[in-house]
Image: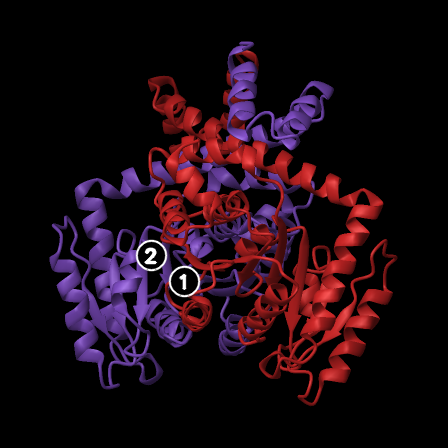
Chain colours: A purple, B red
Amino acid sequence: MDGWLRLLKQKDKRTIARLITKIEDGSPEKNQLLEKIFPETGKTFLIGLTGPPGAGKSSLIDGLITKIRQVGLSVGVIAVDPTSPFTGGAMLGDRVRMTKHALDTDVFIRSMGSRGNVGGLSRSTREAVRVLDAAGFDVVLIETVGVGQAELEIMHLADTVLLVLNPGAGDIVQVFKAGIMEIADLFVVNKADLSGANRLVTEIEELLDLQQWEWRPPIVQTIASLNQGISECWSQIIKHRQHLEETGEWVKRRQNHLRQEVLELLEDSFYQFLKQEMKKPEFEAELEQVALRRKVPHQVARIWLNRILFGKKE
Amino acid sequence: MDGWLRLLKQKDKRTIARLITKIEDGSPEKNQLLEKIFPETGKTFLIGLTGPPGAGKSSLIDGLITKIRQVGLSVGVIAVDPTSPFTGGAMLGDRVRMTKHALDTDVFIRSMGSRGNVGGLSRSTREAVRVLDAAGFDVVLIETVGVGQAELEIMHLADTVLLVLNPGAGDIVQVFKAGIMEIADLFVVNKADLSGANRLVTEIEELLDLQQWEWRPPIVQTIASLNQGISECWSQIIKHRQHLEETGEWVKRRQNHLRQEVLELLEDSFYQFLKQEMKKPEFEAELEQVALRRKVPHQVARIWLNRILFGKKE
C-alpha cells in the first residue's frame, strides 16, 4: 500500500486536505488517485443538508457533529458554496467549527467553492466525499447554501437529504416548485421557537398530503442554536437509513448514483472528443452556414451526431 | 408566414410571452418553433449584466431602458434568477419596471427562474433571447443575480458584459478569482456616492493593471437610483460594440456562441442516446462490478465510450 493511502486510512488530516486540494485543482494525477482509492469506498453514510441562507444549517451541523461523536461514529463535513466568492457565510461557520474540533481526529471539515470551475462543482464534491469515505469516516455531511440548480445536483449525491427551513424562509410553496420536494427525505424546521413555526409545519404537512409516499418525509422541529431537537433529528435520519435498507432502496439508490457518475464521465469524455471534432474544416463550414442563418443549429447538431455515432451522412 | 410569426415580428407582447412560456415549459413543439424563428435572428445587440445581490442592477437597468428608448431603440429584458425561488428580488424589480413600461410596445420585460430545470437555465435564456431577437428588439439586456456558475454560463451568451459592483460588495479580489475578470467588458461602480467608491475604483484599476488588454474594461461610476452616470455607461457600451466590430471580434464572438450552442445540442442528444445505451443488460452487469468495487467508474466509462464511438471492444 502506498504511504499516502496508509496515512489517508489513518484519517491523517494533512493527507486528506492535500488530496482534496489536488482534486479541486484538477491535478494531472487526479484520476489515478481516485482510481486508487475507489476500492476503499462505499462504506460511508452520506447525508446532505440544504436550505435557504440563514436557515441555521451551520448550527444544526454543529449539533449533529457532537451527536454523531457521542454515539461513537466519526464524521466528515463538506460545506459547498456554489455562490462563492460573494457569500462568505459557509466559510466563516467552518472556521468556528474547525477550531472546536481541531484536535479530534474523528472530525474533518472542509469548504469548497466554485473556484470559477463552471459545472464541475458536484463532481468535485463527489470526489471529495470519496476521499473522506476512503479515509474511513462513518458519516459524511454535505452542506449547501441555497437551493439553486448546483445545490440540487449536489444533493443528488446523498443517501439521505435534509431540507432545513425556518419560519422566515418565505413562501413554502415555492420550495416545492423548485424540485426539492422530490429529494427531501426529512424536513427540519429550525428556529422552532420563532412565531410562525407551527404554521410552517402545517403548510409542509398540507403539501405532503398532496401525494402518496413510500417514505413520507417526517418534520423535525429544532432550535439548533440551543441544541434542542438534535437527538430527534439524528434518530429520524437513522430511521430513514433503516427504511432504505429494509426496502432495498439503499442498494438501488447507490447503484443509481454510480450509474449517474459513469454517465457523467462518459459525457465529459464525449465533450472532449466533440471539441476536437468541431475543429475540423467541414464543421467550420457548417457553422458558417448557421452564422449566415442558412441552416439552424438543431439541424447541424442532428447531422453531426448521426455522423459520429453511426457514420451516416445526410 | 405563420400568423404567430407575423404577430411576433410586430412585437405583440402576448405572442412573445406565450412563446417564452412554451420554451420554459419544454413544450413538444419547442424545437420546431425555435427552428422557425432562427432565420429571423442574429440582429439584436445582447448586453449581459451581472453582479452580487444589492449592487443596484435593477435601478441601472431601469435607467438603461429609458436611455435606450431615448435614442430611439427598442429593448427587451430577461431577468434570470438561478437561485429562485428563494430570492424574489428580481421578480419584484420587474414588476415595478413592467408597470412603468406597460404601454410601450418597444419594451418587453420577462423574468426567468430555474423552475427545477437543473442545468437548462442558460439554454432557456438563450432561447428566450432568440424570441426577442426574432421579434425585432434592437437591444436585449440579460440580468443575473450573483456570480455563481449558472450566472457565468448565462453571461457567456452576451456580446457585451457589464459587471455591476458597489462599495459594499466585499473583497474585490474574490470577484476576480471567480472567473469574472475574463468576461467583464465594462465595470460599473454603482452607488458611487457611498464612501469607499474611490477605493473600489482604485482596486479594480490595480487588478486590471496586472495584465495586458486588447480592450481594457473601462470603469463607469453611476448612481443609478438618481439616474446619474447612465449616459456615460451607455456610451461606453456603444464604444465596446464599436471595438468588437472594428477588430472583427464581433463576428468571432458570435461564431463562438453558435459553436457553443451546437456543441450543447450535440451533448444533449448524446446524453439521451447514452441513457438508452445504459439500459442494456451488458451495461448493468458492468455497473454491478463497479458497485462491488471490482471495477472503477473511470475504467467503465473509458471502455463504453470506445465501444460507442469506434466499436472497439477491450
To the question of a shared chain for discs 1 and 2, the answer is no
Q: Which quadrant holds the C terminus of chain A?
A: top right
Mark 2: which amino acid? Answer: Ala
Q: Residue furthest bottom?
A: B195
Residue B161 picture quarter: bottom right
Describe the element under mark 2 as helix, strand or loop: loop
Is residue B158 rendered to the left or right of residue A119?
Answer: right
Q: Chain of mark 2?
A: A
Residue B253 picture quarter: top right
Disc 1 to disc 2, how far (Cα)?
Answer: 8 Å
Describe the element under mark 1 as helix, strand or loop: loop
Q: Nearer the viewer, residue A89 or B25?
A: B25
Is A220 above or below relative to B134? below
Mark 1: which amino acid? Answer: Ser
Q: Residue at x 49, y 70 (%)?
A: A104
Q: Nearer the viewer, residue B122 or A172?
A: B122
Is there a contact, CB below 8 Å, between mark 1 and mark 2? yes
Q: Residue at x 49, y 74 (%)?
A: A101
Q: Which quadrant holds the N terminus of chain A?
A: top right
Tell me the residue that label 1 is attached to.
B84
The dot on residue A178 is 2
Q: Nearer the viewer, residue B3 or B301?
A: B3
Q: Position of residue B231 (x, y in %)?
A: 70, 72
